Image: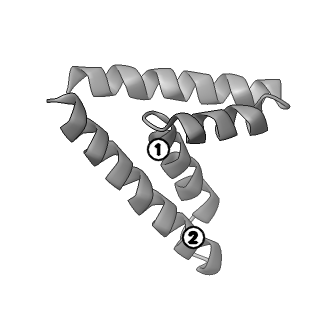
Amino acid sequence: MKYQAKRVIVLALGLVFIVLGVIGLALPFLQGFLFLAIGILLISLYSPATRAWLDKHTVKYPKMHKVVLKVEDFARRALDKI
């Protein structure tokens, strides 16, 4: 798949997860925080500004930062196979 098409799909999917996360914060049966985290991680793959924001806010917590880096690496490897 071409880079631009992959980028658009990942960013759109990230926005969908963020919208679901915001809805999930108000509804008790959706896990809002989980959807927000997935959306932010997806968007950070192709957005340098979001990546910098994520690094700035997770570097204070080394264990969480390590998990974010592992998930990002997993997502990049999965997207490379597509």
Snapshot colouring: one colour
How many other residues sit within 10 Å of disc 2, few (<14), some (14-19) or many (≥20)? some
Query: Residue 2 vs residue 67: left or right?
Result: left
**Residue tagged by mark 2?**
22
Residue lying at 53% horizontally and 57% vertically, measured from the top left: 35
- The image shows residue 4, relative to residue 76, as above or below, that is below
Q: Give residue 50's quadrant in the image.
A: top right
Q: Nearer the viewer, residue 72 or 56?
A: 56
Give the mark count. Answer: 2
Quarter of the figure with the C terminus: top left
Q: Give residue 32's quadrant in the image.
A: bottom right
**Residue tagged by mark 1?**
43
Residue lying at 53% horizontally and 34% vertically, measured from the top left: 48
Amino acid at the residue labelled 1:
Ile
How many other residues sit within 10 Å of disc 1, few (<14), some (14-19) or many (≥20)? many
Q: Give residue 66's quadrant in the image.
A: top right
Q: Which mark is residue 34?
A: none
Residue lying at 47% horizontally and 67% vertically, measured from the top left: 20
In this view, the residue farthest toward the front is 49
Classify mark 1: helix, strand or loop.
Answer: helix
